Amino acid sequence: MSPVENLRIATRALRANKLRSALTGLGIIIGVAAVVCMVSVGAGAQAEVSEKIRTLGANLLLVLPGARNSGGARLESGTQPTLTEEDAAAIRRELADVQVAAPLLSRSMPLVALNRNWMTLVAGINPDYLVAREWQVKEGRIFTGDEIASGAKVAIVGSVVIDELFDGRAGVGGGPFESANCPSR
C-alpha cells in the first residue's frame, strides 16, 4: 500500500468512530500536558533547592569555638567563646584561598518595638558575613567600619522581623530602634 492510501484508510476510520477519536485525542493532550507540568515542577523544585544550597554557602568552612562543660556534661559546640575577631583576621591573612573571614556571635533574644515583641536570632556580624552568605541589603545600607569600631547600636533587620514588629513597613534610618533597650556588644 502507498502512503496516500494508508492516509485515506486512517481518515475513514477516524470519521467512522468520532467519539473514540475525540477521546483518544483528549487523552493524548492531557497526557502531554501532565508530562510538561511534571517536568516544569521538577525543574522549578530543583532550581529552588539549588538556590537554597547556594545561599547556605556551598563553599563555606565554619570554624566553631569550643564546648563548655556543665555538671560533667559537655554542651554543644560554640558554647565556650574561645575564638576572637583577631582569629578571623589571622585566618584571612594567613590562608591565601580565603576570600572572607566573617566572625559571628549570635543568640536568641526578644526584640521589642512599641507594644510588640518577637523572639529571634540576634547576630553580631561584620560586612564580610553578608559577602560570605551572598546576602544583599534591600533597603538602607550596610553598617560602616566606624560604627563597628565604636560599637554603635545599628541593625540590619530581616523581613520576618519587619513583618512581625512593624507591620511590613521597613524601619530604615532608626525609628523604633533608637529607643529600644539593646544590649551593648
Image: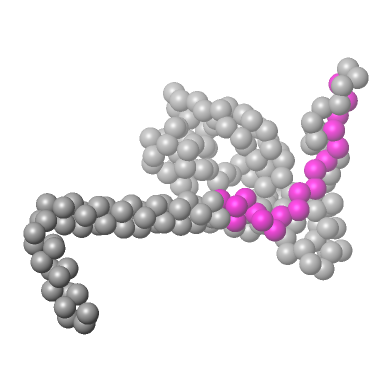
Residue sitting nearer the eye, 139 or 163:
163
What residue is rendered at 49% in x and 36% in y? Answer: 161
In the image: residue 2, left or right of residue 171: left
Using the rendered image of the protein, determine whether residue 44 is visible from the camera's viewpoint: no
Q: Confirm whether the magenta stretch covers residue 64.
A: yes
Using the rendered image of the protein, determine whether residue 163 is visible from the camera's viewpoint: yes
What residue is rendered at 47% in x and 38% in y? Answer: 160
In the image, residue 31 above or below residue 167? below
Which residue is most to the right?
A: 72
Q: Which residues are magenta?
A: 52-70
Q: Which of the image's four quarters has the C terminus?
A: top right
In the image: residue 115, left or right of residue 71: left
Q: Confirm whether the magenta stretch covers residue 141.
A: no
Residue 152, quarter of the rendered image: top right
Q: Which of the image's four quarters has the N terminus?
A: bottom left
Which residue is most to the top?
A: 71
What residue is rendered at 52% in x and 43% in y? Answer: 157
